[in-house]
Amino acid sequence: MGRTTADDTARQSTGISRRGLFTAAGAGGIGLAVGALGTSAVNAAVAPKSPDTVVPFYGEHQAGIATEAQDRMHIAAFDVTASTRESLISLLKDWTEAIESLTRGAEIGDGATGGNYDSPPDDTGEALGLEASHLTVTIGFGRTLFTLDGVDRYNLSKHLPEALIELPHFSADALEDARSGGDLIVQACADDPQVAVHAVRNLARIAFGRARVRWSQIGFGRTSSTSTTQATPRNLFGFKDGTANLKLEDNDLLNEHVWVRGGTGVETWMNGGTYMVARRIRMHIETWDRSTMRDQENIIGRTKKEGAPLSGGEEFTEPDFNLQGREGPLVAVDSHVAMAHPTKNNGVQMLRRGFNYTDGSDGLGRLDAGLFFIAFVVDARTHYVPMQSAMAKNDLLAEYLRHTGSGLFAIPAGVQPGQYLGQALFDA
Ligand SMILES: C=CC1=C(C)c2cc3[nH]c(cc4nc(cc5[nH]c(cc1n2)c(C)c5CCC(=O)O)C(CCC(=O)O)=C4C)c(C)c3C=C
Ligand SMILES: [Fe+2]
């Protein structure tokens, strides 16, 4: 896809305030930041919202991964157009400042109405009066940020992690370039769709002249539970999805299968981070709806009502792949659950965090709907590629799916006050 290099000075027109986060942190953290700001700035930037709908921004890992899955998502990939490394860093600093405000439910900079009358407002305003709604914004880096057509635009190529591969072609992939790839990823999740869309819209506005949206997707319903406290939701085939997911309470398993740890040398910067696999998977809803209940359950390997394995028990009972029925194993070897189970995949597990999506109908009256699959893994080479390769060939479910978008992103660790997202990469 062709790219242009925009004039970086265009960012001035976004009007984002540079005061606040970094100076305040230098003075001892965000608590002191409030005292350091003027009254109108306090109104705009630090207006308190119900604390119980705020997910903390600072931490060892970025929020939005081992966080209870919210109900809504807006995810956007960006192509960076900044002409210099410094300009890219300034974008990440501006995003960090804005995300920190947004996730508190506060307005960005001088707010939607509090700024200079002769400038565009710092915040577009459609989240005014709304709660923080558990908003999390998670950012990451695509392979093309490190090297694009052999060009090292931002002097980053020596820090390209080995695990940030170009995903291979899987059989039956129907990927669209305009729905795939990207230098940067921004995943905004919230319990209010307007809050998630507001976040992405404002980050895109702030990026003006330095990065532009390549593709974006709205998800309207979570398809996973990521905490033992959450009920398992259903996907658009009507099945419970997320039963056997990793949960945020599984600390040891997250350390083994999700978080990058012990990286050395040029990859040290990824410690505390993870990799996001993003796949837009269109589901052939109408064909599925014409298939029998028996076929639907055999294809998934679980009951539709309870989500219990076909070998018996309840939702959280482990499937018994050896239990035989009259015509073979009760859970078919090529059922989705059998294909995806850790025992059939070298023990690997993933943290799935996907969302249902619909983008209206196609020209033939069929729903353009499916699952925007997101999984966080320690290494896609071991934790995604082998499973997807096998599924693309043998999973009974594959016949009902078409992968139309794809991306793999390195998700850096979380930050502390005074740092910007991804700083470890640029300081390395
Ligand atoms: C390569 C990874 C996976 C893709 C792509 C994928 C797509 C996909 N899955 C469903 C529906 C269900 N998936 C379920 C379980 C499940 N799926 C994966 C991986 C991928 N799914 C894993 C690792 C697992 C867990 C397997 C296990 O340990 O038992 C289930 C069952 C309920 C559950 O455990 O979550 C359903 C239902 C769809 C519709 C889909 C693509 C659109
Ligand atoms: Fe699945």
Image (spheres, grey):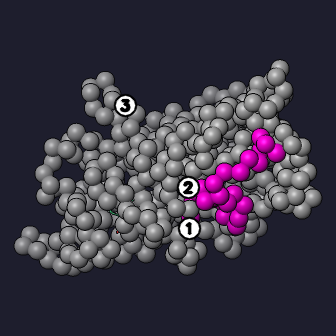
Q: Please say if 283 is above or below 24.
A: above
Q: Earlier in the sequence, mark 1 or mark 2?
A: 1
Tell me the residue that label 1 is attached to. 258
Q: Is residue 301 visible from the viewing direction of this image?
A: no
What is the secondary structure assignment of the residue under circle 2? strand
Q: Which of marks 3 and 2 is nearer the N terminus?
A: 2
Amino acid type at circle 1 is Val
Q: Residue at point 79% right, 42% down?
A: 43
Amino acid type at circle 3 is Gly
Tell me the residue that label 3 is attached to. 360
Q: What stretch is highlighted in magenta?
A: 42-66
Mark 1 or 3, closer to the camera: 3
Q: Please say if 260 is above or below 21.
A: below
Residue situated in front as seen by the camera: 413 or 387: 413
Q: Does the magenta stretch include residue 249?
A: no
Image x and y of residue 417, in percent: 81, 59
Image x and y of residue 69, in percent: 50, 58
233 relative position to 411: left or right = left
Q: Residue at point 61% right, 59% down?
A: 52
Label 2 crowd bin: few (<14), some (14–19), many (20+), radius 10 Å: many
Tell me the residue that label 2 is attached to. 276
Q: Quadrant of the N terminus?
A: top right
